[in-house]
Image (spheres, rainbow, N blue to C red):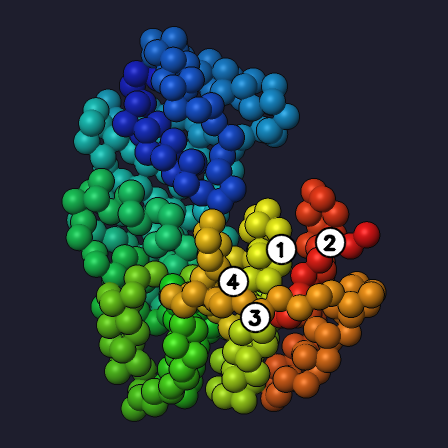
Amino acid sequence: MEKLFLENLLPAWRLYEVLARHTDPPVPLPPRTELLALEEAHLQAPFADFLKALRAWALGRSLGDPPLPQARPLEGGAVELWAEGFRPYPFAVAFRGENPLYFTLRGRTVRHSLHISRRGVRFGREKGVPVPFLSRADELYAPLVLPLFGLDLPGGFLGEALRRGLRLDFGKGVFRQEGRYLHVDPEGARLRLWDANAGAYREEAHANLQPLSEALYALVLEGGPLYASLPEGPLKEALGAGDEAALAAIRAFSHLLAQGYAQALRALPEVASFLPRFLPDGRRLKATARALYAGEARVLPLPPAPPPEDPLLAMRARWDLLALDLSEGLADLLPLAPKPFPTPRGLLAFTPEWATLLP
């Protein structure tokens, strides 16, 4: 087989590199300046030698064997780069010189596949396309791949599938869209929405799948991709059932959790790195040097009170009682009761009223 050199594959390699650095967790690659020097040294060497150098770099730092791509020549002087072990989905990209020819994405089945070229997007199937797959593809691949082929799809892959009226597989049907959460019920043509920042729930009933798809398309155009990852806890079940009592309970407990986190930050700012990304009601947590934000609102801690004689026991009892008192409907809040933060200075116990390092 014809040997391929790195200089023949640079456009395809550049795309791989950007995707590799943006996936979660990122593929272990050298820092940008170090990688550029490595590329320069291997520019006219076989591509396999360049991959060996990258693999040696990662293994030498105990970072594991990275899912590096392979390459092959195509007809007419084109080349293809494919990354079989890439996550979340393997992909292949082909170039002729600087001109991109195609990009393919493949998951577990034919339904989990896309083919992108200057002609547009071709889906693996015209029905049963999994929405979590399209959403993940919109999150990582679409921002880089669509502009490469000059494609302007404001709703990404999911929006394009909705626009064409493809039959989609919504799985469990609950998705996150920034501070908004939605549950899609295709059989009942219903859409349930929870605005985590506002603490507001609403439900839309549609005549059939066609207006439901149109409403979803409008939401995707307005708010961007839908994500299958959600906060831990009963939010998914409560929203899927339209259980407003459970949503209110989750909201109330989340408010107290936020006050507890604010109290902990006041006592020891280093705990910022231990905070969860989301509250159970779906609001994103963000700690700055001066404040804690839950969604768009600043969290104001209660006036600090002196800790009890047995802070660990008092913390457990306080949160368990709050969880039991507030649980409603499908919301079992007891598993959400927080544990002390394991800080470098020791365990930090906290409630909405006080926070202290354990002796």
Front one among 88 and 235: 235
- Mark toward the start of the polypeptide (2 vs 4): 4
- Mark toward the start of the polypeptide (1 vs 4): 1
Q: Position of residue 214 (x, y in %)?
A: 25, 76
Q: Tell me if mark 2 has few (under 14), some (14-19) or many (20+) residues whose alpha carbon lies within 10 angstroms of its own.
A: many
Q: In this image, 185 relative to 152: left or right?
A: right
Q: Which residue is mark 1?
A: 267
* Residue 357, disc: 2
Residue 171 seen: no
Residue at 47%, 27% (x, y): give it: 29
Q: Do callouts 3 and 4 mark residues in contact (Cβ within 8 Å)?
A: no
Q: Which residue is mark 4?
A: 278
Tag 2: amino acid: Leu
Q: Is residue 146 above or below residue 317?
A: above
Tag 1: amino acid: Ala
Q: Is residue 20 above or below residue 290?
A: above
Q: Secondary structure at mark 4?
A: loop
